[in-house]
């Protein structure tokens, strides 16, 4: 069993009751137009059009996200990166071949911001901040203490984003994705994982986390603008 201590921060990005917020198997990219999924207990295989769909869904579901502020192009590049990364996992729920809900899980969240600078156009937004401070601030939020896994510990997996199409919230899709993530993490030998969300999220968001066994451990970030949420996975093995 891996030596993971319970309690480690997560990310901002949940909206609504069904939520919008390893060393693991890499997610394979295919150029084909048809959609293929792995076994439902593991991560999904994504195609290029899936990354575009995820970017559109992200912008619609998480309007306050720093990534949303960088626009569709950057958000699509983020999903193209995480779907091929060996440290991130993407789980999706489809209906009629359309992605309706998704979550991104990282087992190396502390380094995700730096990796995004190397493998996505994030650095361009940081440099372009001389002309557009809003984009610079959004880029710094992704790179630093805001979004995408800038956490105080280096081992526990982190749920980076989870969201559901507005018209399909309440159908249990996000809950099913949480269950898939936890089964997969448990099978890999992890003891816990974490989440982080802004302190001004809706009460429904916090109820979602609590209903799924997360405990709010403390506040973090500049001015304490994030809740750190944690969940132990030991009960899944009983």
Image (cartoon, rainbow, N blue to C red):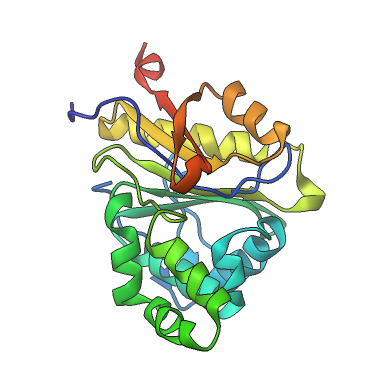
Residue positioned 55% across, 83% down in the render: 132
93 horizontally vs 112: left or right: right
114 horizontally vs 144: left or right: left
Q: Position of residue 26 (x, y in %)?
A: 31, 58
Q: Quadrant of residue 210?
A: top right
**Which quadrant holds the C terminus?**
top left
Q: Is residue 33 visible?
A: no
Residue positioned 54% across, 71% down in the render: 75
Q: Quadrant of residue 191?
A: top left
Q: Position of residue 177 (x, y in %)?
A: 55, 40
**Which quadrant holds the N terminus?**
top left
Q: Quadrant of residue 127?
A: bottom left
3 horizontally vs 192: left or right: left
Query: Is 139 above or below relative to 228?
Result: below
* Residue most extreme to the front: 223
Q: Is residue 8 visible?
A: yes
Total numbered circles: 0
Residue positioned 57% across, 74% down in the render: 134
Q: Position of residue 133 (x, y in %)?
A: 54, 78
Residue positioned 63% across, 61% down in the render: 58
Q: Position of residue 5 (x, y in %)?
A: 25, 26
* Residue most extreme to the right: 167
31 or 79: nearer the viewer: 79
């Amino acid at each position: 069993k891996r030596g993971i201590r319970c309690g480690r921060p997560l990310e901002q990005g949940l909206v609504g009751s069904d939520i919008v917020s390893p060393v693991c198997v890499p997610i394979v990219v295919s150029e084909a137009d048809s959609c293929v999924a792995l076994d439902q207990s593991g991560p999904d295989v994504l195609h290029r059009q899936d990354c575009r769909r995820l970017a559109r869904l992200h912008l619609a579901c998480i309007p306050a996200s720093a990534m949303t502020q960088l626009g569709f192009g950057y958000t699509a590049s983020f999903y193209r990166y995480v779907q091929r990364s060996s440290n991130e996992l993407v789980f999706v729920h489809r209906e009629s071949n359309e992605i309706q809900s998704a979550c991104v899980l990282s087992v190396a969240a502390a380094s995700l911001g730096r990796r995004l600078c190397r493998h996505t156009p994030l650095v361009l937004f940081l440099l372009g901040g001389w002309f557009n401070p809003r984009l610079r601030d959004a880029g710094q939020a992704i790179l630093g203490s805001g979004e995408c896994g800038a956490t105080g510990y280096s081992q526990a997996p982190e749920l980076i984003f989870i969201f559901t199409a507005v018209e399909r919230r309440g159908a249990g899709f996000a809950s099913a994705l949480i269950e898939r993530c936890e089964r997969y993490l448990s099978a890999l030998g992890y003891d816990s994982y974490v989440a982080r969300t802004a302190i001004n999220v809706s009460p429904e968001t916090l109820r979602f986390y609590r209903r799924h066994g997360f405990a709010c451990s403390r506040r973090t970030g500049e001015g304490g603008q994030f809740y750190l949420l944690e969940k132990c996975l030991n009960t899944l093995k009983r």
